[in-house]
Image (tube, rainbow, N blue to C red):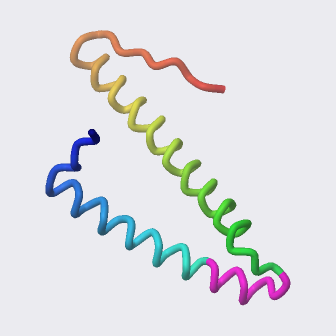
Amino acid sequence: MKKRTPEPAASEINAKTEELMKEFFAHVRKVRKQHRGEGDARVIFEAWAIQKIAALQYTVLHLADAIAELQRSLCGTGKRKKNG
């Protein structure tokens, strides 16, 4: 059986979900207004989601670099392999 997400994480996750949904629907309206012939919400969502995932990956990699740098400064170790 899956464990429930503990509070306050569940509340924060729900709030972020609502925020992302509002952001996406605003994005759909903007795309449909700018590109009258392109209204497929699935195609719009896929492009939007890829942008979000890329931003997350960028952030995680930079956080990993910052953590590795902090670890090196504290312990003299902590190299992270660069991806591409």
Residue occupying the point 63% across, 54% down: 50
Vertical side of 60 occupied by 33: above or below? below
User: Given the current orientation, which residue lies at the most extreme top position?
Assistant: 76
Left or right of 21 in this view: 26: right
Quadrant, the C terminus:
top right
Q: Horizontal and vertical percent for residue 31? A: 70, 80
Left or right of 5 in this view: 40: right
Comparing 54 with 38, the one in front is 38
Left or right of 69 in this view: 41: right
Q: Horizontal and vertical percent for residue 80? A: 46, 19
Vertical side of 79 occupied by 11: above or below? below
Vertical side of 5 occupied by 75: above or below? above
Quadrant, the N terminus:
top left
User: Given the current orientation, which residue lies at the most extreme right position?
Assistant: 37
Residue occupying the point 75% across, 85% down: 34
Residue 64 among magenta residues: no
Vertical side of 46 occupied by 72: above or below? above
The segment highlighted magenta reads: 28-37
Left or right of 47 in this view: 80: left
Comparing 39 with 80, the one in front is 39
Q: Quadrant of residue 32?
A: bottom right
Q: Horizontal and vertical percent for residue 66? A: 36, 32
Q: Horizontal and vertical percent for residue 65? A: 42, 29
